[in-house]
Image (spheres, helix red, strand yellow):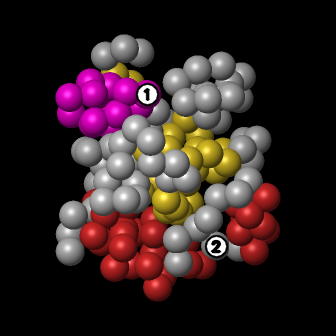
């Protein structure tokens, strides 16, 4: 899997080359943003036994800004595993579809309360519709 992989959701071919994506541990598709539950304790460990499909459910901001500060914030993608319900956050890659990112952001406003509660338990703060300006700014649109 060092060269790339085929997305389990849309079937698109995803390059793992960090020169295109800007990320080292690539596990989500830039076309549909779906991921695969491959990591267990930390990004890149590839130790999860689940291997289920992870649905993009919303956007958040990175909690720490040590390594890659972007105007004081970094936009992160929230995924939920369809099989085991594990929730994770992933760095947005340079080649991710802006239109799909915005669609995920917009649809997260309709998120069910049980998922909102799971995010809260995981200490993940879902970005709200009122933060659209910040999302657009971080995506380089505004």
- Point out residue 1 in the picture as x, y percentages from the top left corner: 41, 15
Q: Earlier in the sequence, mark 2 or mark 1?
A: 1
Using residue 73 as the reference point, say whether residue 128 is left or right of it: right
Using residue 47 as the reference point, say whether residue 132 is left or right of it: left
- Point out residue 130 in the picture as x, y percentages from the top left corner: 46, 85
In the image as oriented, which residue stretches furthest toward the bottom?
130
- Point out residue 50 in the picture as x, y percentages from the top left corner: 71, 29
For the question of whether residue 4 can be seen, the reply is yes
Figure quadrant of residue 95: top left
Marks 2/1 in contact by CB < 8 Å: the verdict is no
> Who's the residue at 72% across and 44% down the image?
86
Query: Helix or strand or loop: what does disc 1 sit on?
Result: loop
Q: Nearer the viewer, residue 93 or 71?
A: 71
Residue 44 numbered mark, or none: none
Disc number lying in front (2 or 1): 1
Q: Quadrant of the C terminus?
A: bottom left
Residue at label 1?
Answer: 25
- Point out residue 90 in the picture as x, y percentages from the top left corner: 50, 44
Residue at label 2?
Answer: 111
Figure quadrant of residue 109: bottom right
Q: Is residue 13 magenta?
A: yes
Q: Which residues are magenta?
A: 9-26
Using residue 28 as the reference point, say whether residue 100 is left or right of it: left
Q: Is residue 92 magenta?
A: no
Dot 2 surroundings within 10 Å: few (below 14), some, or many (20 or more)? Answer: few
Q: Nearer the viewer, residue 114 or 11?
A: 114
Number of numbered discs overlaid on the protein picture: 2
> Who's the residue at 62% across and 65% down the image?
125
Marks 2/1: CA distance? 27 Å
> Who's the residue at 46% across and 33% down the image?
27
Dot 1 surroundings within 10 Å: few (below 14), some, or many (20 or more)? Answer: some
For the question of whether residue 30 can be seen, the reply is no
């Amino acid at each position: 899997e060092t060269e790339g992989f085929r997305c389990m959701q849309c079937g698109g071919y995803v390059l793992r080359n960090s020169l295109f994506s800007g990320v080292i541990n690539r596990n989500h598709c830039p076309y549909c943003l779906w991921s695969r539950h491959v990591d267990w304790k930390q990004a890149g460990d590839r130790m999860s036994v689940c291997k289920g499909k992870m649905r993009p459910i919303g956007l958040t901001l990175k909690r720490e800004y040590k390594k890659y500060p972007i105007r004081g914030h970094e936009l992160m993608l929230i995924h939920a595993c369809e099989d085991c319900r594990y929730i994770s956050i992933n760095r947005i890659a340079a080649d991710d579809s802006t239109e799909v990112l915005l669609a995920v952001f917009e649809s997260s406003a309709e998120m069910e309360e049980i998922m909102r509660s799971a995010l809260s338990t995981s200490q993940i703060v879902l970005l709200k519709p009122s933060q659209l300006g910040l999302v657009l700014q971080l995506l380089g649109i505004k």
